[in-house]
Amino acid sequence: MEVGSITMRLLIAGDGSEDVHIRVEGDIGLCTQLGMLDLAREAVREIARRDDDEGDAG
């Protein structure tokens, strides 16, 4: 099994953009070709987690 990471730049309407690092286990080529929607969903979840963490810390 191939393990790697993908960096996505997610453009968020009204908020600019953020870099999100996602760890991928499995066929990275297949993930990037067929799983971009899933990766984008995970990126949105990661940004939401960051926002929650910042809210808790602030």
Image: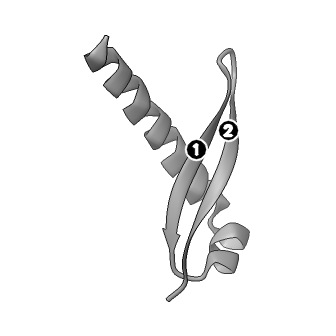
Given the current orientation, which residue lies at the most extreme bottom position?
1
Residue 30, horizontal then vertical, whole percent:
66, 78
Is 1 drawn above or below residue 53 in the view shown?
Answer: below
Residue 57, horizontal then vertical, whole percent:
28, 17
Position of 14 compared to 38: left or right? right
Q: Nearer the viewer, residue 4 or 32?
A: 4
Is 45 drawn above or below residue 27 in the view shown?
Answer: above
What residue would you read off at disc 1? 20
* Three-letter code for the amino acid on which mark 2 is drawn: Leu
Q: Nearer the viewer, residue 57 or 48?
A: 57
Q: Are marks 1 and 2 in contact (CB under 8 Å)?
A: yes
Q: Residues within 10 Å of mark 2 (few under 14, many from 20)?
A: some
Position of 32 compared to 53: left or right? right
Position of 14 compared to 48: left or right? right
What residue would you read off at disc 2? 10
Mark seen at residue 31: none
* Three-letter code for the amino acid on which mark 1 is drawn: Val
Q: Which residue is drawn at the image coordinates 52% and 68% (left, top)?
A: 24
Q: CA distance from mark 1 to mark 2?
A: 7 Å
Which comes before the other along the chain, label 1 or label 2?
A: 2
Q: Which residue is drawn at the image coordinates 70% and 78% (left, top)?
A: 29
